[in-house]
Amino acid sequence: MWLLGYYRVLWISLNCKRMMSGSRIISSATEVASWDIPSLPAQAFQSLLGDFVNPSLWLQPLGELMKLEAVELRHIEMELVEPFETSGWRETLRPCIIVAIRSKGLTGYGECVAGAGPWYSYETIQTAWHVLEDFIVPEILGQEIASTEELQRRSGRVRGHPMAKAGLEAALWDLLAQARNVSLANLLGGTKERIESGISIGIQQDISELLRVIEQRAAQGYKRIKLKIKPGWDREVLKAVRKRFPQMQLMADANAAYRFSEREHLKQLDEFGLLMLEQPLDYDDLIDHAALQKELKTPICLDESIKTPEDARKALDLGACKISNIKPGQVGGLLNAKKIHDLCWERGVPVWCGGMLETGIGRAANVALASLPGFTLPNDISASARYWREDMIEPPFVLEADATIRVPTGPGLGVHVVLERLERVIQRRAEFVS
Ligand code: OSB
Ligand code: MG
C-alpha cells in the first residue's frame, strides 16, 4: 500500500514537471490505465487533483495484469421502438454483438456496433464475428494484459475492422475499471457529472409526420434535434421545421448522400442556421469536404470519414471539418476516441459523441466517453426509452429536466447488465476459454 502510494506521488510529480514544461494536457485516465510512465503526456491540473483526492485510486493496485480467462460473444437482435431511416438504409431490428471478458471473478462488457448490412460502414455482424473469433480473440485469450494500449498493439495486425476491435476493447475498459474499483468515466479522465443529450430523428413519411415527431421529442425535453436528410428530403423539410421551431438547436446528417457537384444545392442549407451539417459527402472523403467547407457557412462535422486518430488529424489539417463526431465503434475503440478528443481539444475543435443505436451496454460506454471535457456539443446519446421498450441494463438511462443524462458513478460501466434480457434476444453464442 505504501509502495503504491509512493508510486502515485512519483507519478504525480512527474506530471507536474511535464505540466510546468508546457506540454498539453487533458486528462489522466488512459495513462493511468497503461501505467506507462515514460510516455505520459502532462495532465490537466483539474483531473490531477481529481485523482489525488480520489481514495479509490490510491488503494488500487495500478497496472495490475489481468489474465483474459474467457471471452464470450453473443449476437443479439433488438427491436427498435420505431424504425430508423437514413439516406442509405432503414433499421427496425438492431443487431449487435455483446462481448464479455472474464478475469479474476470479474466480467467486463462491451458492445460491437456493426450493423446487419454494410451500409454505414463495410463491417457487418458477420464480419465482426469472423474477425473477433478467428483473429483477435486467439491473439489475446489466456494472455496477461495490463492496458487497453496493449490490447490495441496486439490487435493492431488486423487492418481496419474498427467495430470488431472496439467491442472487445470496451469490455476490457469495463473490466479494468472494475478491477480498480473506479467508474469507466473516471478511468477515461471524464470530468462531467452529466452529459448533454440530443436526439437523432430518421427520415419520415412526410413533413407533417416529421413535425409531429419533433413536437413529441421536444415535449419529452430534447433540445438539440438532428434530422436525417437526403436529396429530395432536405431543403423543404428544413424550411418547414425551421418555420415551426425558430429557436431549436437543429442539425442535419446526410450520411454521405451528396456529391461535390451538388454543392450549390448544399450551400442553400446555410439559411437555416444549422448547428452543423454532418457527413454531406462520400463516406471516405476528406478532400472534397475541405473544398466544400470553404464555400459553406455551416460548419461541417465528419462522421463516416474519420475512422482513426490519423484520419482526424488529416481532416483538421485539411480543414475538412470544423466539428468532429466521435463514435468509439467507428474509430476502433475508446482509446482512439480519447486520442481524437485530445487532438481536437488541442486544436480548439469542439466534439460530441455519436451513436449507433446502442443498447444500454454501448450507451454506458458512450456516456462515460462524453464526460471528457472536450465534448462540448450535445451528443447523440438519448434516453434508453428512445430506442428500446426494455433496455439491457438497470437502471435505464433517463433524460433529466435540463436535457442531460447522468454519468454513472459505480465501478466500470456503472450499470447492471440484465443477462436474462440478453438471453431472450440471442441469435448466436460462442465462448472461448483459455
Ligand atoms: O450517422 O450518426 C449516424 C445511427 C446508426 C448509424 C449511423 C448514425 C446513427 C444515428 C443515430 O444518427 C444516433 C443514435 O444512436 O441515437
Ligand atoms: Mg452520422
Image (cartoon, rainbow, N blue to C red):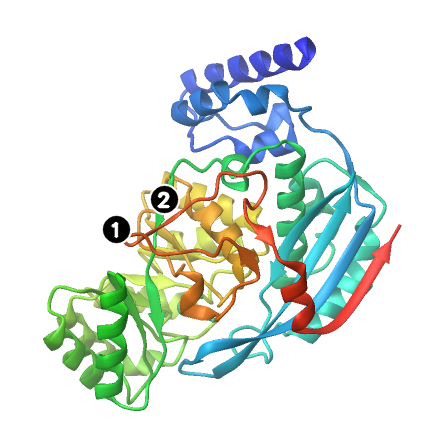
Where residue 332 appears, x then y in whole percent? 59, 56
Callout 1 crowding tier (Cα within 10 Å): few <14, some 14–19, many ≥20: few
**Can residue 309 be seen?**
no
For residue 259, side relative to residue 164 (left or right): left
Q: Mark 2 points at which residue?
A: 194
Tag 1: amino acid: Asp
Q: Is residue 87 above or below residue 3?
A: below
Outermost residue on the right side: it is 434
Q: Is residue 88 left or right of residue 75?
A: left
The residue sitting at 57% across, 33% down in the picture is 182
Q: Give yes or no for contact between labels 1 and 2 (Cβ–Cβ under 8 Å).
A: yes
- Of 170 and 194, which appears nearest the observer? 194
Q: Left of 366 or right of it: where is 295?
A: left
**Figure quadrant of the N terminus:** top right
Report the image quarter containing ligand 1. Answer: bottom left
Q: Which of marks 1 and 2 is nearer the N terminus?
A: 2
Identify the element where label 2 is drawn.
strand
Q: Which residue is drawn at 13% across and 72% down?
A: 271
Q: Residue 402 carries which label?
A: 1
Query: What amino acid is found at the position of numbered circle 2 in the picture?
Result: Arg
Q: Can residue 48 be seen in this view?
A: yes
Q: Where is residue 164 drawn, in percent x and y?
A: 66, 62
Residue 387 in percent (x, y) is at 45, 69
Q: Quadrant of residue 233?
A: bottom left
Q: Give the image location of residue 199, x and y in percent.
A: 34, 65
| Residue 74 picture quarter | bottom right
Q: Is residue 304 above or below residue 401?
A: below
Residue at horizontal 48 percent and vertical 60 percent from the top: 306
SS under mark 1: loop
| Separation (CA) of disc 1 from disc 2 | 10 Å
